[in-house]
Amino acid sequence: MKHLFAIVALVVGLTAAAVAQNSESPDDGIHYLALQISDNDPEKMNTVLNVAANVSRLYSEQAEEVEIRIVAFNAGLHMLRSDTSPVLDRLKSFDQSMPNVSFAACQNTIDAMAKKEGQEIPIADNADRVPAGVVELIELDEDGWTIVRP
């Protein structure tokens, strides 16, 4: 009977450790925030940028670090297109004033738009291309980032 209790306690302990490992953010003192944009709506794009700026400013004022990643896919990719972005000037400003904010453009969406439009899709210089925007968000979540869709 003692062995059974020991085995149950071990299984419970290992399960709790595995859950904690998968649900905790990195233990480096840095806050991690990923923002999703998937709509071609200038108001939502500005909202995402406002959230990024406000979060960055708040943590800076508290002398704390924050990393922010804005992930654009589907129609939200227009935010990062240098030919159609209604917020291109703000993106350039972020590149200069907020190095803790990065941008990810979904390559799946870029390819689909290129096929539909019959031309290359120009992406803002300060945006990284990632294979798939949703997969980027999944992996960030698995790495302990907080995901928000403003």
Image (spheres, rainbow, N blue to C red):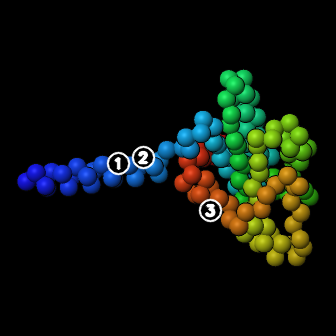
Residue 58 shows in this picture: no
Residue reaching furthest to the top: 61
Q: Amino acid at mark 1?
A: Ala
Instruction: Report crowding for label 2: few under 14, some 14 to 19, many 20 or more residues within 10 A (C-alpha).
Output: few
Q: Are marks 2 and 1 in contact (CB under 8 Å)?
A: yes
Lower sequence index among marks 3 and 2: 2
Residue reaching furthest to the left: 1
Q: Dot 3 corresponds to which residue?
A: 135
When the figure is inspected, residue 96 is found, relative to residue 127, above or below; the finding is above
Quadrant (top left/top right/bottom left/bottom right) for the N terminus: bottom left
Quadrant (top left/top right/bottom left/bottom right) for the C terminus: top right
Specify whether 61 is left or right of 20: right
Residue 146 shows in this picture: yes
Instruction: Report crowding for label 1: few under 14, some 14 to 19, many 20 or more residues within 10 A (C-alpha).
Output: few
Instruction: Pinpoint residue 145: horizontal percent, then vertical percent.
Output: 59, 46
Res 45 → quadrant: top right
How much space separates mark 3 and mark 1, taking CA atoms? 26 Å
Instruction: Report crowding for label 3: few under 14, some 14 to 19, many 20 or more residues within 10 A (C-alpha).
Output: few
Res 38 → quadrant: bottom right
When the figure is inspected, residue 15 is found, relative to residue 51, above or below; the finding is below
Q: Dot 2 corresponds to which residue?
A: 20
Res 89 → quadrant: top right
SS label for mark 3: helix
At a point 71% along the width and 53% down the height, the residue shown is 71
SS label for mark 1: helix
Specify whether 137 is left or right of 39: left
Q: Dot 1 corresponds to which residue?
A: 16
Instruction: Pinpoint residue 34: horizontal percent, then vertical percent.
Output: 65, 47
At a point 70% along the width and 43% down the height, the residue shown is 68
Q: Amino acid at mark 3?
A: Val
Instruction: Pinpoint residue 88: horizontal percent, then vertical percent.
Output: 89, 48
When the figure is inspected, residue 148 is found, relative to residue 73, above or below; the finding is above
